[in-house]
Image (cartoon, coloured by chain):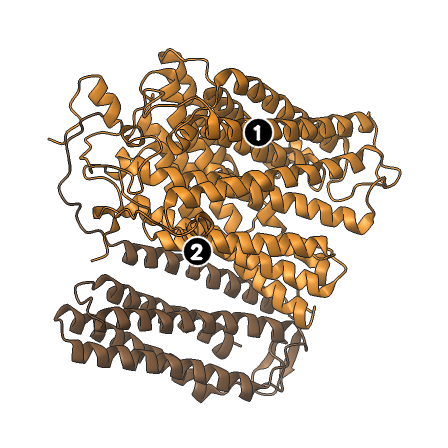
Amino acid sequence: MLALPPAPSAPARRQVFVGTALAITAATTLLGGMLATWLQFRAVAPLRESPRRGLIRDWMPEKIVVPEVATNMMLIGLCVVCVMAQWAVYSAKRADRTHAGLAFGITALFGLMVVNAQVFTWTQMGVAADDGAFHTMFYAITGTMTLLLVVGIVFTAVAAFRFLGGRTKELEVVSASALYWYFITAAFTAVWFVVYVQK
Amino acid sequence: MTSIDTQRVASTAVGPPAVVVWITSADHKQVGRMFAGTGLVGLLMGLVLAILVAFERIDAEGYQLLDTDSATQVLAAARLLLTFGAVAPLLIGLAVALVPLQLGARSLALPRLAAGGFWMWLTGLGLAVASIIANGGPGGGSAEMVDLYLLGTIVMSTGLIMTATSLATSVLTARAPGMGLLRTPLFAWSALVGSVTLVLALPVFVGTSIYLWVDHKYARAAFGGNVGVSDWAGWALSQPFTYLLAIPALGMVLDIVPVMGRTRLAQRSGAYVALGIVSLAVLATVTQTMVTLPWEGDTFLDNAGDKIADLLPWGLLTVIPLLGVLGVLGTSALTLKNGKPRVAASLAFAMHGLLTIGLGVAAHILGSIDDVGVRGSIFEAGTYVAITFGSVTVAFGALCFWGPKLWGRRIPDKAALPLALLALLATVLGSIPYMIAGFAGQPGAVMDGFAYEGPQELWNSLTTVGFTLMLLTSLGFVALAAKSFTGGEAAGDDPWDGQTLEWSTSSPPPADNFSDLVIVGSATPLLDLKSGASGKVA
């Protein structure tokens, strides 16, 4: 066998963190592509007269009302999630299991709150999926966003179980889950603005 | 900290049954072999369907074996199988199996993600193919089966994204000490470039498929129902998306050529750049832009400013990837000129494949010029065949080259060389007549009811012969590989006098790849060691 110089113990490399960053890149192009298609459809929708805003694109049907309190609370809730996820990282670095556990719990709880608010929004808006282009695309894009949210909750649960289960030196998963929540918040901000604000 | 490449895998005397091991394994060599093996099966199935389609085009007066609807579905199934069922798994599978060995790592990064990706890809592809058989797919008559097809493509693509993520993470994080990014073997580098481009491009396809699925299932109001599937998602079965899948094939060539040329790779830095710029095609894919060159003959200079503004994106998205392929071709040719090439099947397959990929990429540029007048014609199928068959041919070469490392046995060159020549003939016959027929005006989307001046039956007959030859070549290669890898001549650990780390371990490698991890000081540590230079980092 050829004798290349032997290596000492390999330095730790942040595989989970880098993998999460790549997955976030994929999710960004997924949502970016979907938002671009949404904007493309809206740009070619026919014009109609709006009592409040004059001539507008006839994209979201007039009778549909967005429950703005719920959608705004989703955005605020995700901002809180970011703070809590970062708190989990901060506590985990100090091996503070009590506070880390609390931070993980609140992160997951607020994540569930956002999912709940999304379901509430779907119910309140009363969009029938078989009514037209806006309707199917609305469910496709918000459904995808919700799926990514659920992935975030599962990711947080895995990080919490690993850390609280005793693997307190493995901080990379905790950092990666925080990174994921930053992405989710940025992505939801884009979806919120395009789908619920611009309509 | 999660650092799987520092720990050796403990061996157990009594293990679970082999089937369970295969299903649950996260060993990259096992996962890679499963990818490549199923890729070969997909290739054979795709070629049979492609022959059916080509045969139908010979007589444009009516259908012989199929009807109008099923012909469209068979065409879709052939493209799906050749693109996502053959080229993608063959190249990605070989990368999964070999890249960690090239990097000097004990394992792939996030190996369960890659294994999960394989099973998702296989499940999704199976669903998509089954749905087409049951009257689904693009233009399918059964609404439920069209829904199932779209769901299958979503699952299949997600699986490939997962595996690509694992591969890219491996190259970024699991390299041996001393191996900077510009010291990675070129196949590993191409796996990184190809994986990142897939991570960027495939999610757009997934997003489109989600829209199509929800819309088709509930309203059919936005995307044109079953007919719209091809319009909106067909770009993933065409150029320039096929370039992205072919990127690892270019890296394979760049690793095979210097070893078989018995010299160092010429212009190594240029080769890294060349592989990188091929990935610019991802922009054309993600933006789904068909760029055209408005030449308009004599009037070109009248609006030169506008024309140049059109030329810039065309040059960036369409021409520059060709420069990358030409760079790979030039580097390979220069290396072979400097060295003493041996007559080997792997080299023959690799060079034939590279030439035909180059032909396809160049033809795609020609096809993107509106004034040439081949838009919507069968010309596009010719470019597709050149790139797809070229990629498959390179993968055959890679199996000849790295097969001994993975299985411990080698394919005899005498038996494989005729297959390499046959593959070249098959690709030429399968692609060039379609390109000529495209210039004559044969449409690409239909299989009957067309007429144009010229020997249209000849062109379509030649293509059918080309596809049949490719099927025979593939069958012959699969049989030869199966026979050689199970009972052929033992290969030894370093049968080709290799230059990179995978040749420093046993053939086949142990579960954790290397007995000891090593430090490397160059891109070709074994070659340096053999030639007396120090491979050690100063």
Q: Chain of mark 2?
A: B
Q: Residue B197: x, y in percent?
A: 44, 47
Q: Nearer the viewer, mark 1 or mark 2?
A: 1
How would you rate the neighbour count of disc 1 (Cα within 10 Å): few for under 14, some for 14-19, many for 20 or more? few
Q: Position of residue B109 (x, y in %)?
A: 32, 50
Tell me which residue sits at (71%, 60%) in the image: B226
The location of residue A89, given as percent across then percent down, is: 21, 70
Q: Residue furthest front?
A: B14
Chain for mark 1? Answer: B
User: Given contact means CB atoms under 8 Å apart, are the residues at marks 1 and 2 in contact?
Assistant: no
Instruction: Please tell me which residue is depicted at 62% across the width and 63% down the height of the picture.
Output: B212
Three-letter code for the amino acid on which mark 2 is drawn: Gly
Which is nearer the eye, B137 or A82?
Answer: B137
Quadrant holding the N terminus of chain B: bottom left
Tell me which chain appears brown: A
Neighbour tally class for label 2: few under 14, some 14-19, many 20 plus, Cα within 10 Å: many
Q: Residue at x 15, y 35 (%)?
A: A6
Residue that mark 1 sits on: B479
Corner quadrant of residue A110: bottom left
Above or below: residue B535 compared with residue B280 = above
Name the residue type under label 1.
Answer: Ala
The answer to whether B438 appears left or right of A113 in the picture is right
B217 lies above or below A98:
above
Q: Earlier in the sequence, mark 1 or mark 2?
A: 2
- State whether discs 1 and 2 lie on one chain: yes
| Vertical arrangement, residue B127 with respect to residue B505, above or below | below
Which lettered chain is shown in orange? B
The residue that label 2 is drawn on is B116
Q: Describe residue B361's horizontal placement relative to residue B460 as left or right.
A: left
Instruction: Work out how far the residue at label 1 is from the one at label 2, CA to CA, in angstroms.
Output: 29 Å
Q: From the viewer's perspective, is A9 left or right of A144?
A: left
**Residue B168 in view:** yes
